[in-house]
Image (tube, helix red, strand yellow):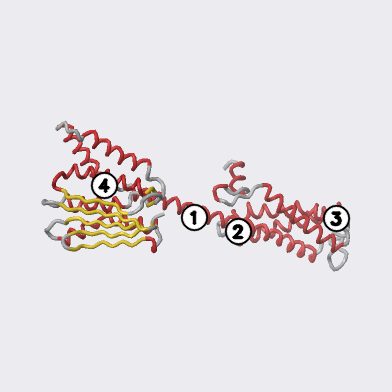
Amino acid sequence: MPISASFKNNFLLNANTGYKVNVTHHAIFWLVYFLFNFLRWGSYYNDYLYSFKANLLGFPIHMSLTYFTVYVLIPTFIYKRKYILFSLSLIATIFVMVIIKYELTYFLISNNVWPEGPEETTSLNTNYVIVMMLGELYVISFGAAIKITIDWLRERQLAANLAKSNLETELRFLRSQISPHFFFNTLNNIYSLSLEKSENTPETILKLSDLMRYLLYETKEKRQSLNKEIKFIKNYLDLERIRYNKKLDLNFDVEGNTKGKKIAPMLLIHFIENGFKHGASKNIGDVNISIHLKIDEDFLYFKMSNTLPQKDLKNNLNEAGGIGLENVEKRLKLGYKPEEYDLRIFEADGAYNVHLKLKLL
């Protein structure tokens, strides 16, 4: 991996995650930490000049240890579960840095390298090494804790974004599952009309064009205008009327104020298409399909019933459920809270019935 790419991945968090940490944040953190230590030890020594020099010398060591641990040792060992190697490497690194700190302090600041110690320290000893190593470990732990926390938040955000993306993709797929057989049948009807030179041919083509345009361009949002959805349903029903002609007795009515209301796109059409697929297409006699939409404040009440073939009503009812209704039930669970919808599907008096209460926006 190129150095620039590695730097962006490790030193900076991706802006798309919502947890971006840039160079300015690092600088502010170390500046605040430096000022805290400078004032703390200046007050302790009663010598702010010495505290400034000591911290100015020690901070490059603190920073080097922290970044080396966070961006090299942890990814190399901790993430690969090599805990013993991590511990040994960390101890060795801190020990080397303490030796360097001792030498720099001795030659650049004071022969007494540990003024806060129990006695004057002018040579390297065990107590000095242990205390200094623990001090460096404290700084490293503090920095590592911040980095690990931010990484955890970033991973959670990425996981949430991925889950949201997958959900949106699944919802788009589910709401696009109107049967292709409908379009094939409609094209065949248009072909028949054109052979007969029917005056209905241009209007039929226009309605099919409106349907396809709606499917392609106006169903991408999570919620769609209820008026547009109703217009789509009307176009669909008009095409089905042409398909079944006098064989079909279709009633469709809308009650209530639809203005400003929104609904999940391509939701109701699955019930309607299912009614034609398992009611009209499999019935050799006249077919009755009734669709009623009622808008009452923030809820839509959708009722539909369609004639089932007289033969083996139970089997036809089971078949009528099919993949399409499983599709709708899944979309309802993904797109609405449990209290925002109520779906009941049942058979009564030789008819297949769907009752849906749905929250509108």
Which class describes the residues within 10 Å of circle 1: few (<14), some (14-19), or many (20+)?
few
- Of the image marks 4 and 3, the number of the one nearer the N terminus: 3
**CA gap, disc 1 to disc 4?**
32 Å
As helix, strand or loop, the secondary structure at mark 2 comes to helix
Q: Quadrant of residue 342?
A: bottom left
Indicate the amino acid at tag 3: Tyr
- CA neighbours of label 2 inside 10 A, class few (<14), some (14 to 19), many (20+): few
Cα–Cα gap, marks 2 and 3: 37 Å
Residue behind mark 2: 149
Please name the residue that numbered disc 1 is placed on: 160
In front: label 1 or label 4: 4
Residue holding disc 3: 106
Rendering coords of residue 191 (x, y %): 19, 34
Q: Secondary structure at mark 4?
A: loop
Amino acid type, callout 2: Thr
- Label 4 and label 3: CA atoms lie apart by 83 Å
Amino acid type, residue under disc 1 in the picture: Ala
Q: Residue placed at 63% from the left, 48% from the top?
A: 11
Residue that numbered label 4 is attached to: 179
The amino acid pointed to by label 4 is Ser
x then y, percent, for residue 13: 59, 49
**CB of mark 2 within 8 Å of CB of mark 4?**
no
Q: Relative to 20, is 102 on the left or the right?
A: right
Q: Where is residue 176 drawn, in percent x and y?
A: 33, 47
Q: Quadrant of the C terminus?
A: bottom left
Q: Nearer the viewer, residue 351 or 294?
A: 294
First in residue order: circle 1 vs circle 4 = 1
